[in-house]
Amino acid sequence: MKISGLNEIEEVSGWKSALDWWVGKCGFCAGRGLRGPHILHELRQCKRGGSEQIWKALGEAMYEDGILPFNGRDMCHLPYDICDDWMRDEDGEWVRYDTNRDQCKYSQYLLGDTVIGL
């Protein structure tokens, strides 16, 4: 029998760790077996063909047609559970943690570019 709350926390923690790892890395290059300094750039700066993927198929649907997940923060498009700018209040509702911050630690393109690159 699963304990829902604990498994959910572990799952969110795992996704958050995975996304943290992808910050500043190119999914296109990593997905093709490159490692180390060869992946230390974002998909949009990729000179090996990754940046071209943004405007093809899935990238076109996500960015040109605006098909992005809307289940979280408008700046990074990540679920509230993952974005550090959100927390649950005493009623269980999602609220901004720091209303003075106007930058998210995650790029607005991190999730989409990682999926497109892979």
Image: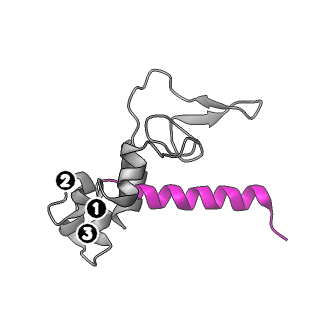
| Left or right: 60, with 15 as reference point | left
Q: Sort mark 1 into few (<14), some (14-19) or many (20+) by Cα contacts within 10 Å.
A: many
* Residue extent of the magenta highlight: 1-23
- From the viewer's side, name the closer residue of 118 and 40: 118
Q: Main secondary structure of the magenta part?
A: helix
| Left or right: 31, with 14 as reference point | left
| Left or right: 108, with 91 as reference point | left
Q: Could you give the CA–CA distance between mark 2 and mark 3, rounded to whole angstroms?
A: 11 Å
Task: Give the residue at mark 1.
Answer: 26
Report whether residue 21 is seen: no
Question: Residue 29 got which mark?
Answer: 3
Residue at point 36% right, 52% down? 60
The image shows residue 64, relative to residue 23, as above or below, that is: above
Q: Residue 81: x, y in percent? A: 60, 46
Q: Classify mark 1: helix, strand or loop.
A: loop
Q: Classify mark 3: helix, strand or loop.
A: helix
Kindly indicate whether the residue at mark 1 contacts the one at mark 2 (C-beta within 8 angstroms).
yes
Within the image, what quadrant is residue 30 found in? Answer: bottom left
Q: Quadrant of the C terminus?
A: bottom left
| Magenta-colored stretch includes residue 20 | yes
- From the viewer's side, name the closer residue of 15 and 58: 58
Q: Residue 45: x, y in percent? A: 19, 53
Q: Sort mark 2 into few (<14), some (14-19) or many (20+) by Cα contacts within 10 Å.
A: few
Q: Could you give the CA–CA distance between mark 2 and mark 1, rounded to whole angstroms?
A: 9 Å
- Mark 2 vs mark 3: which is more N-terminal? 3
User: Which amino acid type corresponds to the residue marked 1 in the rendered image?
Assistant: Cys
Farthest residue, direction right: 1
Task: Give the residue at mark 2.
Answer: 45
Q: Sort mark 3 into few (<14), some (14-19) or many (20+) by Cα contacts within 10 Å.
A: many
Residue at point 52% right, 36% down? 73
Q: Residue 95: x, y in percent? A: 62, 29
Kindly indicate whether the residue at mark 1 contacts the one at mark 3 (C-beta within 8 angstroms).
yes
